[in-house]
Image: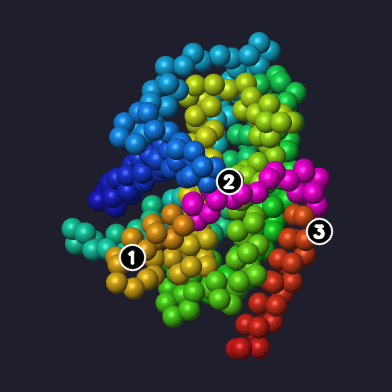
Amino acid sequence: MATVIIILVKGLILAVILLSVFGVMTLTERKVLGRFQFRPGPNRVGPGGSLQFVADGLKLLLKEEIIPNGADRFVYLLAPVISLVAALFAFAVIPWGPPVHLFGQTVPMEIGGPNVGILFLFAITSLGVYGLILGGWSSHNKYSLLGGLRSSAQIISYELAMGLSVTGVLIAAGSADLNNIVSAQTNLWFIVPQILGFVIYVICMVAETNRAPFDLPEAENELVAGYHTEYSGMKWAMFMMAEYVNMVTVASLATTLFLGGWHGPWLPPEIWFVIKVALFMFFFIWLRATLPRLRYDRLMAFGWKVLLPVALLNTLATAVWVAVAR
């Protein structure tokens, strides 16, 4: 019973933190983009614009909810829920610190830690695309449908390369358990022997989260706003929450697989984990401010013709290296 209560408490705390990231990151992104573009960014609500995300949240809560004529009402309302729930569940297996002793029990610093945690994470994140596809299809809008189709094709193609990019880490660590992978990096982070896999993963994680320059499912100059064109208010906000939670998830997975997880000198392990994830989140913003959007056919060709073959070669080379070393 105590174990169940601990899991529920951890799940509640984690859900609140991840949903809070949406508000904080929208403000941070707008402020950082402003600095990149030589403008102040939000500066009206609160000291230095620090309460702008609160005003945005109230606006979304009070905004009129509209359902288009001809839309499939049930699927239309269900789609953003699928995306958000899948994004929240995916983070459940990410260890953000070493186990702690609390009330006579050893409490792992993740919601659940199955032996195949990485497979569980990829399985759950794969479900998130259903929200985008169903949202685009159910809206009874051709632009939304095209955005949903783009999203499904993009995620499928880049998910293959992403899966192969982490296979080298699994081979080197000899385990699919994320805690064991972190432990295997006590002396040497996997970014050193798996630098090629890391580069492939970083490119794929940007495409997976539909972030610029790979934000083709939402390309406003082509598709108005893509799969969420017909969404407003809190339904639209749920799609955006899912996007930012997914950003945190892929950044946390990169930290766990390639940057030693919570390992680091002097500071508490959890602080190191947060710092590493925050650097990846800044990287997302930096890319958005720097690179133009790719053409869709070039995006798909790059995924299938470049990233996938290189990821296969990296996996093969790692397997040979491990076999020879043993």
Q: Residue 288 magenta-drawn?
A: yes
Q: Residue at (49%, 21%) from the top-left corner?
A: 233
Crowdedness of circle 3 by 10 Å Cα count: few (<14), some, many (20+)?
Answer: few
In the displayed structure, 192 sits above or below 67; it is below
* Residue 235 at least partly seen: yes
In the displayed structure, 156 sits above or below 234; it is below
Question: Within the image, what quadrant is residue 67 found in?
Answer: top right
Q: Quadrant of the C terminus?
A: bottom right
Crowdedness of circle 2 by 10 Å Cα count: few (<14), some, many (20+)?
Answer: some
Mark 1 and 3 residues: CB-CB less than 8 Å, in contact? Answer: no
Which three-letter amino acid code belongs to the residue tagged 3?
A: Lys
In the displayed structure, 34 sits above or below 59; it is below
In the displayed structure, 223 sits above or below 268; it is above
Q: Position of residue 45 (x, y in %)?
A: 35, 28
Residue under pointer 1 = 269
Residue under pointer 2 = 289
Residue under pointer 3 = 305
* Residue 126 at least partly seen: no
Mark with earlier residue (1, 3):
1
Q: Position of residue 37 (x, y in %)?
A: 54, 42
- Residue sitting at the far left: 103
Mark with earlier residue (2, 3):
2
Give the structural element (helix, strand or loop) at label 3.
Answer: helix
Question: Within the image, what quadrant is residue 165 found in?
Answer: bottom right
In the rendered structure, which segment of residues is drawn in magenta? 280-301
- Residue sitting at the far top: 69
Q: Position of residue 29 (x, y in %)?
A: 48, 42
Which three-letter amino acid code belongs to the residue tagged 2?
A: Ala
Q: Residue at (51%, 15%) from the top-left corner?
A: 65
